[in-house]
Structure formats: C-alpha cells, structure tokens
C-alpha cells in the first residue's frame, strides 16, 4: 500500500552526484517524506526526511517540489558504499510502509 | 550501529520447533515494530507496539506471536512455521508514532525453516 513510485533501478559513477526521484502525487498536507536505504544483508537505515522545505544532513539532501507531489534524494558524491536499495516513504496512518524502492548501483 | 539489537542473527528451525526472536533497544523509544522481508519483496509490516501495547496486527498468522514485556524489549515467538516463512525478520523502533519521527532498524534475523 505504498503511496510512492520510484524507478526500479539506477546507475551512477563513483564520485558523481546521484539524483533519486520519487513521485507521491497523493501526498496530504501532514505527510512527511522519508528516505531510507538498505545495504546488502542489513536492515534499512534512515537517510533523511522533510515536510516542505529542502533538507540537508551529513548523508544527503532532500529536494521537495513546490507542490510536494515529488521529491529527489541527492547524494552529492556517490561512493561504492552508497550502493543500496533506496526507499522513499510516506507514512500510511502512523506506520512506515515500504515499497520496492530503487536499487542504486555505483560503478567504479 | 543503530542502537537496535536483534538476536540471533541467523536461525534454522524445523517446522515443529518453537523458537523466539529477540529485539532490544535502549534509545528510550516508545514504539517498536516487526517487519518481514522475503526474497525480492518489499518489507511487510507485521506488528506495531506503542507504549508496550499492540496497536497493529497486519493479518499475520497465529504461528507468529509477538510480546513486548517492556519498552526496551520486543520478542517474536515462532511455532509450527512453514518453509515459506523463511525470510529476514527486522525489528525497528521510533521515538513515537508521530509522523516526523524516524525509525531505527536492527540488522535482522535471517530465519530458515526446514
């Protein structure tokens, strides 16, 4: 019942920026946009979240469209360790509901 | 290290066995979650506890039985499982169920039912 759509997979070259898109056209005014990533053989890891304004932290930046119907996770300089499945999530009720995410491959 | 610890990391059990998965967090969080991740499928939310009370049970078969004895610990008791229950079981916690809180996940228990 995920309310977001993401590309199945993307590729990036090492040390280049990566822009991971997410569409959430049914977003409501109180929905926060969350991003998580899951490295192989590990549990998901929190990356960033935001409501309306763009957000930055040590891991990434989150750019939110003015109408909030889409967002983009930006990794400024991809490394091999950033290869993972990236999930864009809107909370369903109060729950974290995951879709299939985007599998990011980083090429050396 | 997320502050959420799951044990064991790997478990192999027969269909007639009874086993338990353990999750522990000392982050002071009030909400805890069990998820199941089967091969090549998205995470499926199984159970949600808030302030030690179960608030969500997403049509999970009764052979899975959760327990939350206190705010720091969450168990998943398993009995008479089927091979299709083999999966990665993930525990998570969050400060609360407020929409702006983030979840912290453990590394999971890889369960194989034989």
Image (cartoon, rainbow, N blue to C red):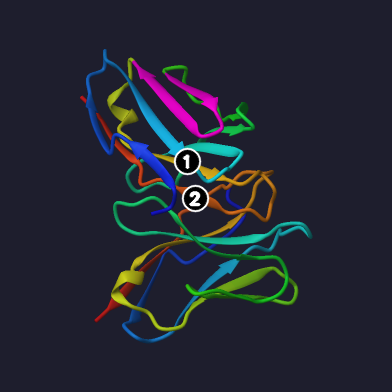
Residue at screen point 71% across, 58% down? A26
Q: Secondary structure at mark 1?
A: strand
User: Which residue does the numbered mark 1 point to in the structure image?
Assistant: B25
Residue at screen point 69% across, 43% down? A93
Residue at the far right: name it: A29
> Is there one chain holding both mark 1 and mark 2?
yes
**Residue B75 in magenta?**
yes
Whole-Å distance between the Cαs marked 1 and 2? 9 Å
Which stretch appears magenta?
B64-79
Left or right of residue B113, residue B70 in this image? right
Specify the principal SS of the magenta part.
Answer: strand
Q: Position of residue A61 (x, y in %)?
A: 55, 76
Residue B104 disc label: 2
- Split into 4 quadrants, where in the image is the N terminus of chain A? top right
Give yes or no for contact between labels 1 and 2 (Cβ–Cβ under 8 Å): yes
Q: Against B27, is A88 above or below?
A: below
């Amino acid at each position: 019942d995920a309310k977001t759509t993401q590309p199945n997979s993307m590729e990036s070259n090492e040390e280049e920026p990566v822009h991971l898109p997410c569409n959430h056209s049914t977003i409501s005014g109180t929905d926060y946009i969350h991003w998580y990533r899951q490295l192989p053989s590990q549990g998901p890891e929190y990356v960033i979240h935001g409501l309306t304004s763009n957000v930055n932290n040590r891991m990434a930046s989150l750019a939110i469209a003015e109408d909030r119907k889409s967002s983009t996770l930006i990794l400024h300089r991809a490394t091999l360790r950033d290869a993972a499945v990236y999930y864009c999530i809107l909370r369903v009720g109060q729950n974290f509901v995951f879709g299939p995410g985007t599998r990011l491959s980083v090429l050396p | 290290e997320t502050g959420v610890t799951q044990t064991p990391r790997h478990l192999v059990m027969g269909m007639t066995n009874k086993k338990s998965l353990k999750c522990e967090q000392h982050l002071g969080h009030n909400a805890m979650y069990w998820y199941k991740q089967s091969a090549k499928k998205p995470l499926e939310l199984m159970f949600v506890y808030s302030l030690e009370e179960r608030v969500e049970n997403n049509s999970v078969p009764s052979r899975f039985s959760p327990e939350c004895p206190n705010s720091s610990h969450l168990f998943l008791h398993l009995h008479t499982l089927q091979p299709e229950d083999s999966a990665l079981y993930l525990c998570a916690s969050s400060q609360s169920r407020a929409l702006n809180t983030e979840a912290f996940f453990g590394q999971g228990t890889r369960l194989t039912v034989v």
